[in-house]
Image: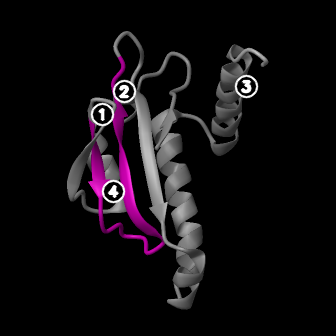
Amino acid sequence: MREYKMRRGEHLEERIPDMEGTIEEYFGSITDTEEFNGSDLYVVDDPDNPVFERIVAGAVAYSGKKDKLAVHFEERPAEDVIAEGNADAAADAVSAKNDFLLEATGRDAKSRRESMKRDVEDKDADVPDA
């Protein structure tokens, strides 16, 4: 499960006021909910795009902090997707993921990667050398 921060000064509930509807618009009908860090996330067990096997997404609330977007994209093996003649669906899947994450976080793929690198570097700096 990956968690994404919003841009400075922005909040998830302002960017996506209807999380359930937005997830259904991008990925398909919500079939269930799943608990993660004390928050209920939406589950799409049969996504519209054949590349995805299952998607879990939603807002995770943290006491005293801004909500974060938590997402897990479970994808089918590429060779299975290609064998079924759905190679074009791969590009659509990448677009759907990136468009959804951009709408939710206000960050493009490059800035999301840089932010995650900084988070990892910050955690590594906190660990003393043995």
- Residue lying farthest to the left in this orientation: 32
Q: Are marks 4 and 2 in contact (CB under 8 Å)?
A: no
Q: Earlier in the sequence, mark 3 or mark 4?
A: 4
Q: Earlier in the sequence, mark 4 or mark 2?
A: 2
Distance between the Cα atoms at labels 3 and 1? 32 Å
The three-letter amino acid code for the residue at tag 3 is Glu
Is 47 contained in the magenta span?
yes
Distance between the Cα atoms at labels 3 and 2? 29 Å
Could you say whether the residue bearing mark 3 is in a helix, strand or loop?
A: helix
- Residue lying farthest to the front in this orientation: 130
Q: Residue at x 71, y 23 (%)?
A: 124
Q: Choose between 58 and 17: the one closer to the eye.
A: 58
Placement of 124 over or under 70, stated as above or below? above
Q: How is the image coloured?
A: one colour
Q: Are marks 1 and 2 in contact (CB under 8 Å)?
A: yes
Q: Which residues are magenta?
A: 40-62
The residue tagged 1 is 17
User: Of the numbered discs in the image, which one, if any, rests on residue 14?
Assistant: 2
Q: Residues within 10 Å of mark 1 (few under 14, many from 20)?
A: few
Relative to 107, 124 lies left or right = right
The label nearer to you, 3 versus 2, is: 3
The residue tagged 3 is 121
The label nearer to you, 3 versus 1, is: 3
